[in-house]
Amino acid sequence: MHFSQSVIEIIQQRFSCRSYLNLPIADDTRQLLADLAASFQVGPLGTPVRCVLLAATESDRRSLRGLGTYGFIKNPAGFLVGAVQSGERNLEDCGYILEHLVLYATDLGLGTCWLGGSFTKSSFARRVAVVEGESVPAVVAIGYMAARGDVRNEPLRRRLGAVHRLPWEQLFFRVSFDQPLSKAEAGAYAVPLEMVRLGPSASNKQPWRIVREGKAWHFFLKRTPGYGDSLIFKLMRLADIQRLDIGIAMCHFALTASELGLSGHWLVQKPAIACPDEQTEYVVSWVE
């Protein structure tokens, strides 16, 4: 793998950084990240995805000002932009690849912050020359993290983010949703599951649910009311951001499993597992 340290350590180091030093990314660091971004052409579920590293411009900053808390991103040196073709699992593929780049950026000593929603009509899309059939569902702010003394509430956010994670018994199950999976039962996969639990998600909602069935780990999306498929999302043409979150979870799971020597592959084949409610839907399975 191309990481200089354990991906498990990198996942635990990463946090959503909103304040950066007003410095450009060093040429050698920028080239490493740009080269990795260019190397990705398709997601794990088969959707064509392009990722580009852009230097920040004033027009990019203007594109963020109408996006609530995203407007408080201070002095980013650049942005990772994901452009993805339309497709049934396109957002999951985009989330997977962008999070892979986020972890690589963390390994290089950079701070990052996910910005999801819709950027298809923004300056970001124009700068990466979006073509017919492509959309830009998310960008990632990137740069050198400001010194802690210059970052209001950043350490507090970091601590709260770790504390405000859902417990195992609400996220991971065996055979059905009425049987929580213990860490002992997860065996060697306890670490990949914990890295999923620590992953970033929109508003920290952690919409992923995973059910173990034999050698298969079935990933489900438990939607938060008002996200993704609501009327306001459709009217504003916002991306279904919780599907991006599932891609992030997939990335953490697969990279950690690979580091631990646990081989497997992704497969979309809906299991005969009853969903607990209308907000829960099947997405994909990891088969050992």
Image (spheres, grey):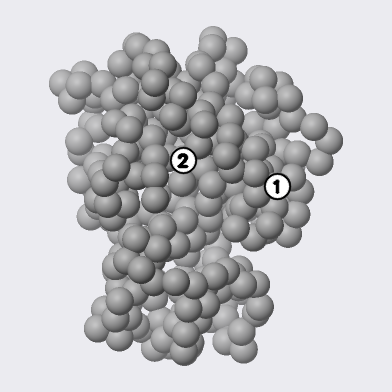
Mark 2 touching mark 1, by CB under 8 A?
no
Residues 52 and 2: in front is 2
Q: Residue at x 57, y 87 (%)?
A: 273
In the picture, the disc for residue 113 is none
SS for tag 2? helix
Above or below, 283 against 251 in this view is below
Above or below, 206 against 51 in this view is below
Q: Is residue 21 left or right of residue 49?
A: left
In the picture, the disc for residue 48 is 1
Disc 2 to disc 1, how far (Cα)? 16 Å
Residue 35: where, in percent of width, then height?
52, 31
Residues 120 and 233: in front is 120
Residues 103 and 265: in front is 265
Q: Amino acid at mark 1?
A: Pro
Q: Can residue 216 be spotted in the picture?
A: yes
Q: Amino acid at mark 2?
A: Leu
Residue beneath disc 2: 101
Above or below, 45 against 172 in this view is above
Give neighbour class at mark 2: few <14, some 14-19, many 20+ (Cα, 10 Å).
many
* Quarter holding residue 59: top right
Residue 283: where, in percent of width, then height?
60, 68
Q: Earlier in the sequence, mark 2 or mark 1?
A: 1
Q: Residue at x 31, y 38 (%)?
A: 107
Residue 118: where, in percent of width, then height?
64, 36
